[in-house]
């Protein structure tokens, strides 16, 4: 076999033995190969890469979507938060909810307290609106003598992410809501000498 | 060194089939024998041979006759296929007697054929103990039967280096055989 250069004598026997080793593939291998090719079969690595490629694309697309969603989440000016169901009007039933249109983790533009009449668990057309206010947390006129103040804490009412907001509701049981506002609870609130009333209402 | 997968292309199925048939007729046995020096079973060598020619069809437009022979180019692809196969952990380190029904021989009797198979089995068992690079050299030289120049081209080394390495590998093999 190594006739294109000389080998040391002690290696020639081995060289000859190796050169004598010959295998013959089965005669049908060639036609079988042609048939497989004709039926569109490809190399396994091609097949696997064709399988992997869509998976990689899906992962890449997911990452892009996640990044876009995170970007939107961080940069969307307003967010609508709907929380249900609590006893906000003092009626005794946990059938009230609150809908807020707010700048994320900041100013409230709109706040609506509703009674979830259709038990949908969210604000819907069949619900009764108990309070509908704009950006200012002012008391409604006609304040009576039997005001009840309740605080619901802590949830994410402003879409900021952490459950660090409290909802303050002032009303006349069983179904009148005179004022509602949210405020952010600070981590040191429990230890602070200042009460909840020191936090700005939104 | 040749780079067979550098320019993939998609020939028409008929064109690919015609080319593949011609290449297989010319070099199929050499490729099969190359794999047979690495794969313990004929079935495995067949699979690897088929895989090689599928790749050859896919990459045929990248073949440049100025860079080397068709056979050297196809064997370069075969090397890649073997490397992939090794990575997949399917390499068995022994050759079992009785799995050599594809061995070419001129033995007149079954007994002589058995002795021949045993001799070749011992030889390939010894080859299997060599380092992958050494086995590569043996497979190319004795399996596929390429000469020094083509071996150098496929391995990307000089012809002098091929000769030196082959001497050393054969010497190692001889020692293994005598152990």
Image: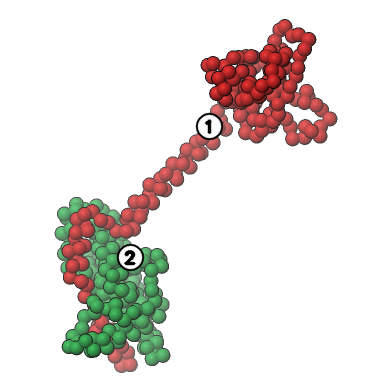
**Label 1 Cα crowd, 10 Å radius (few <14 / some 14-19 / many 20+):** few
Name the subunit of mark 1: A
Q: Position of residue B100 (x, y in %)?
A: 27, 78
Q: Secondary structure at mark 2?
A: helix
Q: Position of residue A86 (x, y in %)?
A: 66, 24
Left or right relative to A70: residue B72 = left
Nearest the viewer among A152 and A200 is A152
- Answer whether labels 2 and 1 touch (C-beta < 8 Å): no
**The C terminus of chain B, quarter of image:** bottom left
Q: Quadrant of residue A123?
A: top right
Name the subunit of mark 2: B
Q: Secondary structure at mark 1?
A: helix
Left or right relative to A140: residue A39 = left
Classify B66 as above or below A143.
below
The residue that disc 1 covers is A72
Q: CA distance from mark 2 to mark 1?
A: 47 Å
Nearest the viewer among A151 and A159 is A151
The lab-note entry on whether marks 2 and 1 share a chain reads no
Colour logic: by chain
Q: Position of residue A185 (x, y in %)?
A: 72, 30
Q: Quadrant of residue A81?
A: top right
Classify A127 as above or below A166.
above
The residue that disc 2 covers is B81
Left or right relative to B147: residue A139 = right
Q: Residue at x 26, y 82 (%)?
A: A21
Outermost residue on the right side: it is A193
Q: Which chain is green?
A: B
Q: Quadrant of residue B145?
A: bottom left
Outermost residue on the bottom side: it is A9
């Amino acid at each position: 076999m190594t006739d294109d250069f000389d080998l040391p004598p002690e290696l020639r026997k081995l060289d000859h033995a190796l050169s004598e080793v010959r295998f013959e593939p089965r005669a049908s291998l060639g036609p079988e190969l042609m048939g497989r090719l004709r039926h569109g079969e490809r190399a396994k690595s091609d097949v696997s890469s064709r399988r992997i490629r869509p998976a990689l694309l899906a992962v890449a697309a997911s990452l892009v979507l996640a990044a876009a969603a995170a970007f939107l989440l961080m940069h969307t000016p307003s967010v609508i938060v709907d929380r249900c169901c609590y006893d906000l009007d003092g009626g005794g039933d946990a059938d009230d909810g609150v809908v807020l249109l707010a700048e994320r983790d900041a100013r409230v533009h709109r706040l609506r307290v509703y009674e979830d009449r259709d038990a949908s668990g969210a604000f819907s057309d069949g619900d009764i609106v108990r309070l509908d206010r704009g950006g200012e947390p002012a008391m409604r006129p006609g304040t009576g003598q039997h005001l009840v103040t309740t605080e619901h804490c802590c949830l994410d009412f402003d879409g900021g992410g952490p459950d660090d907001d409290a909802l303050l509701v002032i009303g006349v049981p069983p179904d009148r809501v005179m004022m509602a506002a949210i405020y952010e609870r600070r981590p040191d609130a429990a230890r602070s000498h200042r009460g909840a009333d020191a936090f700005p209402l939104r | 060194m040749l780079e067979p997968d550098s320019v993939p292309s998609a020939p028409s199925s008929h064109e690919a089939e015609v080319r593949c048939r011609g290449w297989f007729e010319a070099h199929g046995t050499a490729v099969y024998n190359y794999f047979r020096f690495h794969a313990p079973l004929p079935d495995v060598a067949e699979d690897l041979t088929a895989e090689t020619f599928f790749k050859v069809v896919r990459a045929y437009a990248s073949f440049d006759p100025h860079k080397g022979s068709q056979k050297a180019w196809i064997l370069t692809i075969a090397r890649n296929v073997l490397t992939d196969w090794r990575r997949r952990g399917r390499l068995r380190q022994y050759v079992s007697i009785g799995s050599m029904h594809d061995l070419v021989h001129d033995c007149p009797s079954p007994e002589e054929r058995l002795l021949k198979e045993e001799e070749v089995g011992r030889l390939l068992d010894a080859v299997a103990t060599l380092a992958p690079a050494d086995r590569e050299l043996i497979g190319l030289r004795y399996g596929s039967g390429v000469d020094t120049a083509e071996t150098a081209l496929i391995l990307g080394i000089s012809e002098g280096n091929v000769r030196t390495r082959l001497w050393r590998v054969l010497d190692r093999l001889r020692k293994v055989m005598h152990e």
